[in-house]
Amino acid sequence: MSNTPISDFIEQNYLHFNAAALVDAAKGYKAHLAANGKMMVTLAGAMSTAELGISLAEMIRADKVDFISCTGANLEEDIMNLVAHSHYERVPNYRDLTPKQEWDLLERGLNRVTDTCIPEEEAFRRLQKHIFQQWKDAEDAGERFFPHEYMYKMLLSGDLEQYYEIDPKNSWMLAAAEKNLPIVVPGWEDSTMGNIFASYCIKGELRPSTMKSGIEYMTFLADWYKANSAGKGVGFFQIGGGIAGDFPICVVPMMYQDLEMHNIPFWSYFCQISDSTTSYGSYSGAVPNEKITWGKLDIDTPKYIVESDATIVAPLMFAYILGK
């Protein structure tokens, strides 16, 4: 038996079209790391609810990821899966649900993400009291942190261990917290925890300033990029589109054009997994070459696009990169 059955299968069968693009991009990722490059991974959509943590956590522990940009939903939903997994419900026939059946799910406290329902009481509310305490303690001490830093504090405190319902090795947020992996969460306000934080501010129980802002995330990223872009440079592995990808990739033109730091290198590897239709004017559907015109990628930056379902493609690529 081969020691790398998944990699062998991929190399033997993934020879053309999107399958070949998957192999080329994975090989490019490995080559970038082998040359001592750093790698940014961005998470859009509901990848945490799709349980990407099973493979991403292993990538983090193996030092295959140096920085993550994700939506607020991905930040919190990995932890929700960690503490409430047995209460999730699958709805395989979700395409056939009537409005009344959707309403019934709401009445039962189940919020649907495609074929998976997240349980409000066991997921959102279970986390709420613990994350509120982190926010309140910081405010009382006159301290301010980023959204992900509060999550890290909550995870590392051990307060949630009583609720664990999956093997903790399958939580990418726990793996990231243990390594203190740098994260940016653009648009965090557009998340359940962001809404909950806003509600406490409206009630006068917390101040908005207790949470560091998106502008502060950009300055944090700029400092990190400047410190880590020497040598082979920093690669960009984008899962999906939207703000999780657009926000961090803009740090390069911001530094080059707006700060006039002309010694800042471009991103040195780029791969996007996307099923967005190209040429409709969306960021998600923009082909990599368009990013040259925005000062994000160089002419000779290795560029890959895999036009497929990220829930299928990303775990396969991670397995290949891990040598499985």
Image (spheres, helix red, strand yellow):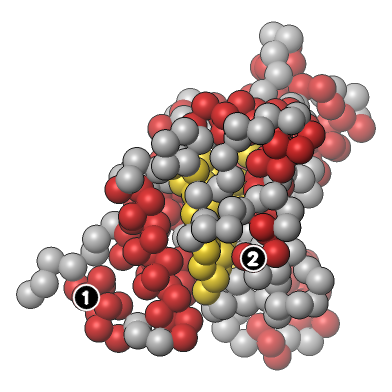
Amino acid type at image mark 1? Asp
Determine whether the residue tagged by mark 2 lies in a helix, strand or loop: helix
Residue hosting label 2: 289
- Disc 1 crowd rating (10 Å Cα; few below 14, some 14-19, many 20+) is some
CB-based contact (under 8 Å), mark 1 and mark 2:
no
Amino acid type at image mark 2? Asn
Q: Nearer the viewer, residue 310 or 8?
A: 8
Residue lying at 42% horizontally and 54% vertically, measured from the top left: 56
Sequence-earlier tag: 1 or 2 = 1
Asked if 129 appears above or below 59 in the picture, the reply is above
Q: CA distance from mark 1 to mark 2?
A: 31 Å
- Disc 2 crowd rating (10 Å Cα; few below 14, some 14-19, many 20+) is some
Dividing the picture into quadrants, the one containing residue 238 is bottom right
Quadrant the N terminus occupies: bottom left
Residue 24 image offset from top left, x and y in percent: 39, 70
Residue hosting label 1: 8
